[in-house]
Amino acid sequence: MSRIGKKFRYIAKGGGKAFIPYIMAGDPDLGRTVELVRILEDCGADIIELGVPFSDPLADGPTIQKAAQRALSGGVTLHKVIDLVADLRKSSEIPLLLMTYYNPIFKYGEERFVHDASEAGVDGIIVPDLPPDEAGNILSFSRKSDFDIIFLVAPTSTEDRIRRVSKSSRGFIYYVSITGITGSKLSMDSSISSHVSKIRSMSGKPVAVGFGITTPEEASEVARFADGVIVGSAIVKRASDPDASLKEYLLSLRKAIA
Amino acid sequence: MPALDELEKAYFALGKDRDFKREIDLLLKTYIGRPTPLYFAKRLTDYLGGARIYLKREDLAHTGAHKINNALGQALLAKKMGKKRLIAETGAGQHGVATATGAALCGLECEIYMGSDDIVRQSLNVFRMRLLGANVVEVAIGSRTLKDAINEAMRDWTTNVRSTHYVLGTVFGPHPFPLMVRDFQSVIGKEAKKQILDAEGRLPDYLIACIGGGSNAMGLFHHFIDDEEVKMIGVEAGGKGIVPGEHAARFAGGSLGVLQGTKSFLLQDDDGNILGTHSVSAGLDYAAVGPEHALLRDSGRARYTFATDDEALSAFELLSKTEGIIPALESSHALAEAVKLVPVLPKDNVVIVNLSGRGDKDVQQVARIKGIEL
């Protein structure tokens, strides 16, 4: 079982919920990313999502688009993010996920990517523009190691699609809280919780919810029914704030996700 | 994915629907003005002194380019699917104008995404879209051209998928778009085939079309693919030459990749990031090419080449002066290839060039390039 699977099992035993923050690797530089990972871990993150900068981030809103552009202009690539994880692994065992688009992986070579990434200590990936229908190759390579491929379910997903994602997704299932892009305004309604319960009962896998979660109140509301809460744009926006105020914000999220 | 499944289902169902087909055929005839003529360009033929050149006059279609064939088809489809709003990307503005037109005709709301660079060089079309009731949204991120407009349109579609249909303007993007857009555009080649048989009593030796995403070329090629004696040439934008960032010739300077839901040839760096492009023509200024063109290229059925900005600009002026037709800068790339190829062909050869759009929209930009103040 991967670090991610173990972490969810451990959290569930204690009756808690997973706090999954996202940061853009290399924004504004890789040195800051190392600091941020430490801060996130200190503030109680359970799993960290590292964004890999890409020129055309289709699923992302303006905050993460701009962060990706900053990282790209600093020369950050998928190779460098994998190297960064190898470095981080010298001092941390926190589960680490990469969130990247498909073309950088395709260009890297799928088999080589899964090999190099798991060797470096990456526990899995989220690839928003890769549906399970097109993921046959990478899924077969990932089965050889404890490498999780996490697929997304949208509010508009049909039962057929949920079934398909449930079958393929490993580690957890990513439920996208809204029809939209990262950092959009979250509209809390009862359909989110009923979708999440349905996906959990259909898949038997943990379901984490992301897209648009900003405030501790929202995080707390989502944590009532989800197994994990993913916060991205709101943290990326604060990534260059003074550490004290960033930590205060992260701790408020941690406290809310229980 | 659910939106694509819904679209595929609706499209395949309506494809078999006789009433839908009748409705489209009637509008093609009475609204777009089809069939567009196949014109024998005698003076250009004499000037080049080789094969006989015919121009498929898509520039005479309503709104001034082939884009309307697809936009109108998708607008009608969206209406049948119960959608209230159309969105689209546009580069040169022709697809934006065509979609705004389709939206007006069908009584749908319309929003067009356009890169800030393109808004500057195609200001006339921006105003046309607004006149047609569409809202033009400026895209100021990334390379600020067609690729980024597609990203923004896809983001909008993801957000408003329940009420909105995304009218993708070319044979690109996730299935069923490449197939559906090709089908709507294939009327070009269907007519051209009949017209050339009427005019010459035989099939042409060459078809030439410019390629941004590749919809006018797919539209011309489709009905000729099984006629192996007909050679097909796609012309990409060579920009200032085949140097990264200075052109949009995917087959000359690109490699296999996956962008915007499609696997095809892309201009990208070693890390899989998409490179900036350049072309004098906004409609060809795009980092990827339709997947069916990649197939035709790999099978050898079609040949792909490029024309530089300068070659396209001279072809633009040549056609204006010899035939009294001002072509779009996009179509001028196809003409530039004809200028190179035709003189070395025997006089009894027949070449069809797809004149995919008219050049009124480009007049200001060409004046700017020539340093002329209007």
Image (tube, helix red, strand yellow):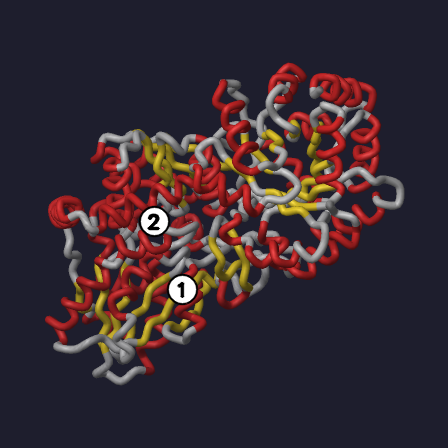
Q: Which residue is mark 2?
A: B363
Q: Residue at image x 24%, y 44%?
A: B72
Q: Residue at image x 54%, y 27%?
A: A197
Q: Position of residue B133 (x, y in %)?
A: 29, 29
| Residue B217 can be seen in this image | yes
Q: Residue at image x 25%, y 38%?
A: B101
Q: Residue furthest bottom?
A: B346
Q: Residue at image x 80%, y 25%?
A: A43
From the viewer's perspective, tell me whether residue B30 is left or right of residue B177. left
Give the mark nearer the N terminus: 1 vs 2.
1
Q: Position of residue B315 (x, y in %)?
A: 35, 64
Q: Position of residue B204 (x, y in %)?
A: 23, 75
For the N terminus of chain B, the image quarter is: top left
Secondary structure beneath disc 1? Answer: helix
Residue type pointed to by label 1: His
Chain ID at mark 2: B
